[in-house]
Amino acid sequence: MIQQVELTNFGPIAHLKFEDLGAINLIIGTNGAGKTFLLKSVYASIKALEQNGRGKEPRSIKELLVDKLYWTFQADPIGNLVKKGTGELNFSMSSSKNESFQFSFGKDTSKSIANLQNSFEKRESNSIFIPSKEVLSLQTIIQKSRNRDKEFGFDDTYYDLANALLPRSQGRNRKSFSNARKQLSDAIGGIIEFNKDKNEWMFHDINRKEFSISLTSEGIKKVSILDALLGNHTLDRDSIIFIDEPEAALHPELISKFLDIIAILANDGLQFFIATHSYFVIKKLYLIANQKKGMPIPVISFEAEDPKQYDLSKGMPENPIIRESIRLYEEEIDL
């Protein structure tokens, strides 16, 4: 499990330290503050570590990281990731096992990173990033844009997810995973399955009626991604899941159920990093934190140039999202 992350001069982020991380970690703030940059920086690093030494992978950790930063941020050159007007980008990450991973580079960096230190053990697990837009109906298009065209458009969060959704060998699943899948199915009123004959995902409702994924709602497609990853054994207890704007295209009731399922998986060992604009998401996670016997849910709140850290088990964080919700409530009272 990731225990601490620190960034300096990374994109819009001047400096940020997110520490004492838990099973669920929340990132909140205004548009353009750096929420997605934080998610992607950790994701790119952990994916480079997972690829390092896997199978017949010939590239070094430095080469893997450059490639991952390039395609995840679509930065050409990667030196463009350095905050404007500063000298050097720095990133460090440590785990609960006292492992560490850190690197730095300047604005002129193109295809190599000279300064990188890594003490992480080889990772066998698969981590995944679930972006704000659904992927199921775009899977073939995403793979084509990279495998054949080698073009920017869909970044590596989409490409990795499209590949992870490919059908894999089936087998007995963990009890918590099976329970989570059952709750996901109940929440959306059916399941998705890949039809090999039609070469596309299909949605089967509770009456076993079949619908093309293109005719299925955005919310169902988004929630079904997690079900597919649990079902095809991509994920295990040591996986790390990054979710950007879980509220996108979801009805509030479905958001609530989705976050309850995330809490089940977090209690079984998976780690989550969630970025949101939604007061509803923050409030639901606050309730989860306090219903689970004080389950810590660290929050990093982007406020101007000075991100602040809170813990949802100790109260709602100070943030423009919260303040605007209070302002609207007070405006309503005054009507």
Image (cartoon, grey):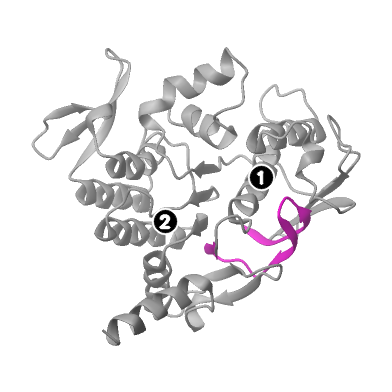
| Left or right side of 312 for 287 | left
Q: Amino acid at mark 1?
A: Ile
Name the one closer to the observer, 3 or 319: 319
Q: Position of residue 324 (x, y in %)?
A: 44, 74
Label 1 residue SS: helix
| Left or right side of 39 for 231 | left
Specify whether residue 139 is painted magenta: no
Q: Would residue 55 be seen by someone viewing this image from the given angle?
A: yes
Label 2 residue SS: helix
Measuring 84% from the left and 31% from the top, which residue is drawn there? Answer: 110
Specify whether residue 26 is painted magenta: yes
Measuring 23% from the left and 38% from the top, which residue is drawn there? Answer: 191
The relative height of residue 193 versus residue 184 in the rendered view (above or below) is: above
Measuring 46% from the left and 80% from the top, which residue is drawn there? Answer: 294
In magenta, the rendered stretch is 1-28
| Left or right side of 279 for 208 | left
Identify the residue at the far front of this view. Answer: 335
The relative height of residue 261 versus residue 207 in the rendered view (above or below) is: below
For disc 1, the neighbor class at 10 Å (few under 14, some 14 to 19, many from 20) is: many
Residue that mark 1 sits on: 46
Identify the residue at the far left of this view. Answer: 207
On the image, which quarter does residue 173 sit in? Answer: top left
On the image, which quarter does residue 280 sit in? Answer: bottom left
Q: Position of residue 242 (x, y in %)?
A: 53, 50
Residue that mark 2 sits on: 265
